[in-house]
Image (cartoon, rainbow, N blue to C red):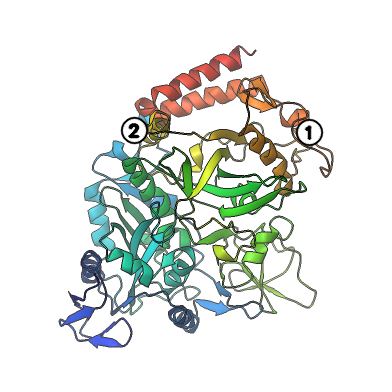
Amino acid sequence: RLICVNIMLLINNRPARLGVGASVGVRSLASIPLLPPAVAEFVKGAVEECKPSGVHVVTGTPEETANILAGLEKEGMVKKLPQYDNCWLARTDPKDVARVESKTVIVTKNQRDTIPIPAGGVKSQLGSWMSESDWQKAREERFPGCMAGRTMYVIPFSMGPVGSTLSKYGVQVTDSPYVVASMGIMTRMGTPVLKKLAEGVEFVRCQHSLGRPLPLKAPLVNSWPCNPDKVLISHLPDTRQILSFGSGYGGNSLLGKKCFALRIASRIAKDEGWLAEHMLILGITNPQGVKRYVAAAFPSACGKTNLAMMKPALPGWKVECVGDDIAWMKFDSQGKLRAINPENGFFGVAPGTSNRTNPYAMATIAKNTMFTNVGETSDGGVWWEGLDPPAASVTLTDWHGKTWKPGSSTPCAHPNSRFCAPAAQCPIIDSQWESEEGVPIDAIIFGGRRPEGKVIMHDPFAMRPFFGYNFGDYLAHWLSMESRKAPTQLPKIFHVNWFRKDATTGAFLWPGFGENARVLEWIFKRCSREREDEAAKKSIIGWLPEDGTINTKGLSGKVDMGALFDVPTTFWQKETKELRAYFTQQVGGDLPAQVEAELKALENRVHNPY
C-alpha cells in the first residue's frame, strides 16, 4: 500500500523543492508522495536533523538519471567522455580517495559485541568500536543542518534481485547526486523497490552527507564537496542503521556496498543463519558441459575481479561471472549452499586492468560507466597505469587535472582510482546471475598475497576491514554450519596463492591470469572425488595436487612446479608461531575451541612432519 505522508520541513525561510516540481513554504506541511509509513518516518527524521532545501524521491528512470548527470556536469563534479557511450569522469578532492578504516566504526552497547578484547593493551586489528554515548556526541557535532542549501535524495534500493528470498532492502538519504548516479549502477534502485517496501519488508536505514552545507565557508577542491576532517562512517547493527559523514568516495558513500552488504549484512546473516562474505562468485564449465559454481575470498588488490572474469587458457573450459566482490550464501531446503551477488554493478580498481589482464572487464566498462580519479586523454578517453601508452599525438591529464607525461614521478591515475559499471554489460555475465534462488556453490577458495608461503593469515576470510561483529563469534558462526539440524551439503574448501616468488630472482613462480584455469580444473575435479587422496597428496598443511595432476600442457614459459608446491617446514614453524601470537593477542578468549584445536594440530605437524 503506497500512501502520502505529511512531513514538516523546517528550512531556512525558503521554499523547499519536493520531488519534481512541487514546492512548499517553510514550516508548512509538505506531502512526500508514495512513501510507505516506515520509510516516511525515517525520511522525516533525516529532514528534521539535516535541514535540506528540498527532498527528491529517486525513481530510477533513465530520464531521471540523465537529469542527475546533467546537474553533476553543470556543477563541475563530472565531465562527459566523448570517446565512449554515456561514460563520465569524476575527480575528487585529493583528501577523499579511499575507504578510511580509522574513521569507520561499529557502535554497540558492549565493546565485546563488536571486537574481541585484545590482550595487554594491543590495538585491535579486527574492527573499531565506538560507545553509544561517544557516537551520539559525534553525531550531534556533524549532522544537524549538514544538508542546508542542498537537495536530499531518497534512494530506495535492493541488494540482490527484487523479490529474491536472499535479497535485503535499504533506503539511503544523501545530499550527493554523484552517489545517486553511482547507486543506480551498483544497486537495483527506485520505484520497483518502493513497491516492495510498501509491502512492509524490513529495510536498513542509511544516512549520508558530504558535510558541506551551503553557502560554503571555504572553496571546494575539484568542485568535490567533502569534509575530510570530520569523516565518520558508523554502523549500528542492533538497529540496522548506517550513518556516513564527510566523504563522497564510493566505499564511504555508496552505503549499499561494504557498509550494508558486508558489515551490517554479516550481522543480519549471523542472526538469521546465513553468510555475507567478501567473495567473488564464478561459474566454470568443463569441455563436457558440466558446470560448477565457486566462491572465492581474496583481500583487495589480489585479483578478485580478474578471476571472476577470467579468460581460461585451457581449451574447452568456460568461466562466467556471477559477481566480483560480495556473496550472500544460504542453505536451501535440500541443504545446498546457494549464493547471490547482492550488487548490480562492478566497482573495480582501474590501474592494472587491461586487455592483457582482463579483456572482459575492459569490454564491460566501454559504456554507461562512471570513472573516478583516472587519467584523461586529450581525445576524450581514459587512461591509467597498465594500459598501453596512447598515440604520440594524444596528451594525458592526471587525476589532479594537470598535464602528465610518461616518466613523471607521480602516477597519472590514483592507485585506488575506480570504474563503476553495470554488471549486465559483462560479456561473460552468467545466465543465472540474477537467479532468485541463487547459484549452487560446490567450492570456496581462500587466498591472498604471501610471497613466501600460502595465504594472508592476518586478513582472515578477506573480511578484516568488514566484520560487523566480534571475529570470534564470526568464526563460531561459520563452524555452526556443520552442525545445522537441516540437511547440509558443505562445499569443499581450498587455499591458493597466485603470488609466490622465486627466492633468487624475485619473479613470480606462476603466470596467473588465464593460466589460473589450470588450478580451477584441479579444484573442479576434486569436487567430485570418490577418494580423499584422489589426485592429491597429504602435506603438513593439507592436501596438495599430486605431481602431474595440474595440467601444464601448453603452459606459457617454464614453471617450476616443485618450487610452487614446496612446503618449507621452517617457514611454517615460523608461521604457526605468528598465528599463535595473533590469535592470543587479537582474539583471546573468543577463539572457538575447534580453531584452537586445529592450530594445535598444525603446530604438532609442522614440528613433527610426516
Along the horizontal axis of the image, is 88 left or right of 313?
left
* Badge 1 element: loop
N-terminal of the pair, mark 1 or mark 2, is 2
Q: Residues within 10 Å of mark 2 (few under 14, many from 20)?
A: many
Q: Where does residue 559 sit, x and y in percent of width and height?
A: 80, 37
Q: Tell me if label 1 and label 2 are in contact, CB under 8 Å.
A: no
The kind of residue tagged 2 is Ile
- Residue at the image point whose x is 69% and y is 51% from the top: 318
Q: Is residue 211 above or below residue 557?
A: below
Q: Is residue 411 above or below residue 537?
A: below
Q: Where does residue 474 sit, x and y in percent of width and height?
A: 39, 36
Q: Nearer the viewer, residue 517 or 251?
A: 517
Along the horizontal axis of the image, is 491 left or right of 487?
right
Q: Where does residue 571 sit, x and y in percent of width and height?
A: 64, 24
Q: Quadrant of residue 168?
A: bottom left
- Residue at the image point whose x is 44% and y is 27% from the top: 583
Which quadrant: the N terminus?
bottom left
Q: Nearer the viewer, residue 380 or 538?
A: 538
- Residue at the image point whose x is 42% and y is 39% from the top: 126
Q: Is residue 446 above or below residue 161?
A: above
| Separation (CA) of disc 1 from disc 2 | 41 Å
The kind of residue tagged 1 is Thr
Q: Quadrant of residue 468?
A: top left
Q: Nearer the viewer, residue 483 or 542?
A: 483
Along the horizontal axis of the image, is 92 left or right of 127?
right
Q: Quadrant of residue 413?
A: bottom right
Along the horizontal axis of the image, is 574 left or right of 511?
left
Q: Where does residue 105 sit, x and y in percent of width and height?
A: 35, 49
* Badge 2 element: loop
Judging by the rendered image, the residue that carries numbered circle 2 is 117
Judging by the rendered image, the residue that carries numbered circle 1 is 504
